[in-house]
Amino acid sequence: MQDLNKLWKIFKDKFTDTGLTKGAFSAPGRVNLIGEHTDYNEGFVLPMAIEKEVVMLGQLRNDRLVQVFDFVYKTEIKFSLDSLSPSKKDTWTNYLMGVMDEIQKAGYPLQGTNLIFGSNIPRKAGLSSSAALEVVTVLTMVKLNSLDIEPLEMAHLSRRAENNFVGVACGIMDQYISCLGQKNYALFIDCRTNKYQLTPFKDHNYQIVICNSKIQRSLINSEYNKRREECKRAAKFFTHRLGSKIHTLRDVTIEEFKQYQQCLPEPIARRARHVILENYRVQAGVQALRKKNFSAFGKLMVESHRSLKDDYEVSCAELDLLVDLAIEQEGVLGARMTGAGFGGCTVNLLKRDYVDAFEKKIKKEYKKTTGITSDIYITRPAEGAKVLENKSDRTD
Ligand code: GLA
């Protein structure tokens, strides 16, 4: 992926050199270790960037045209910066157009650009391939146009693109970690204040392993938006009972929940329980990692999965199977579904010596029951979006 000379060759075969600023950029996917469906409740999350990424190469043009070539899927599109509107046909282009639209709406000027990009993040697998595409597009446009925009603002622009242009009411987690991830660290993000703390994750005896169920997430947008509404209803209920100190479910304590849960209708009570307890699990998980108590962290992962399955109801049979198979294996400390759910991946915490055996066993048993060959990715926490090369690096 990162052989830039080869990628520049693809670029040159596709576009005539404009002689203007050019550069190469990347943005990673992510896996969320714990803290699911908490970001849009202004709660806590603990994702890490993964060693899979989107790479984008670009060069400014003298006009308002944007030409894009996806060198993995071999598709291309042209559009003008003066007429950006969501495409029903080439939906992948909405991530790029959406970001450019948001940058312009925020008052920053953009010039036309030639772009190529490619990704090795599996699509629709809950590893944020779309957030990575948004983030790499923002970074490319910001750097080529020499705009003064900080990484956190880039994350917000990307999220707004997804909300307003793509039409998914996602929270901030995916774009945030893709922008701000750091090697050897997970990020403990407070999704109310947008402050983050680095949480070390570099013990050589332990390994994060991701299992792809290969079930492509269906119903995801409608169910996701439904959960958001249910959380809002629950928060409103607590504001009514406890006063204006309650803005979102983030503000409700476990004791307050227990006191009033009987008065909440189903499934709202279960949805609220998931979010409130998950916020506690993230905080406990961060403490556990700081003390290098990996087995305590693993237990919290399993609790999180049970809660997503039974209370939040965003898991599916295949994800549950992957988790059940994992926690039976020797050397596995924890396993849970990761991302929005309804398919996609599980994240597993293992003792490193057991990784090979785990991989073989999971593939075999998962295939036996479902007929599907799962993909397994072994990854360390990676760095967030970055400049790989800018115009001053190249003389040709
Ligand atoms: C998706 C969204 C995130 C977050 C997760 C669930 O990945 O994009 O903002 O809500 O689902 O934790």
Image (cartoon, helix red, strand yellow):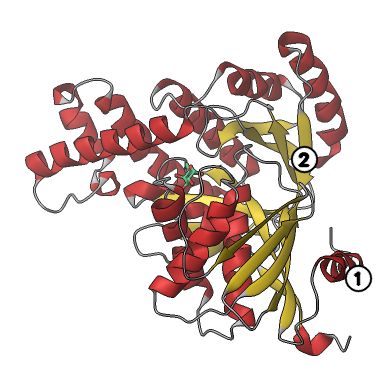
Tell whether 47 sits left or right of 264. Answer: right
Residue 87: x, y in percent? 51, 49
Tell whether 230 sits left or right of 207. Answer: left
On screen, residue 249 above or below 344: below
Residue 22: x, y in percent? 73, 80
Total of numbered circles in the picture? 2
- The residue lying toward the viewer, choosing from 230 and 54, is 54
The image quadrant of residue 85 is bottom left
Residue 297: x, y in percent? 58, 41
Q: Is residue 98 visible?
A: yes
The image quadrant of residue 389 is bottom right
Q: Residue at x 71, y 38 (%)?
A: 210
Q: Is residue 196 visible?
A: no
Q: Quadrant of the C terminus?
A: bottom right
Q: Secondary structure at mark 2?
A: strand
2 or 1: tag closer to the N-terminus: 1
- Which mark is nearer the camera, 2 or 1? 1
Q: Quadrant of the N terminus?
A: bottom right
- The residue lying toward the viewer, choosing from 86 and 319, is 86
In the orientation shown, which residue stands out farthest toward the top? 369
Tell whether 162 sits left or right of 130. Answer: left
Q: Which residue type carries mark 2?
A: Tyr
Cβ–Cβ below 8 Å for labels 2 and 1? no
Circle 1 residue? 5
Q: Residue at x 26, y 26 (%)?
A: 269
Circle 2 residue? 377
Around disc 2, counting alpha carbons within 10 Å, would you say few (fewer than 14), some (14 to 19), or many (20 or more)? some
Q: Residue at x 16, y 30 (%)?
A: 260
How far apart are the two marked residues, 2 and 1, measured between alpha carbons? 27 Å
Tell whether 248 sits left or right of 142. Answer: left
Q: Secondary structure at mark 1?
A: helix
On screen, residue 157 above or below 294: below
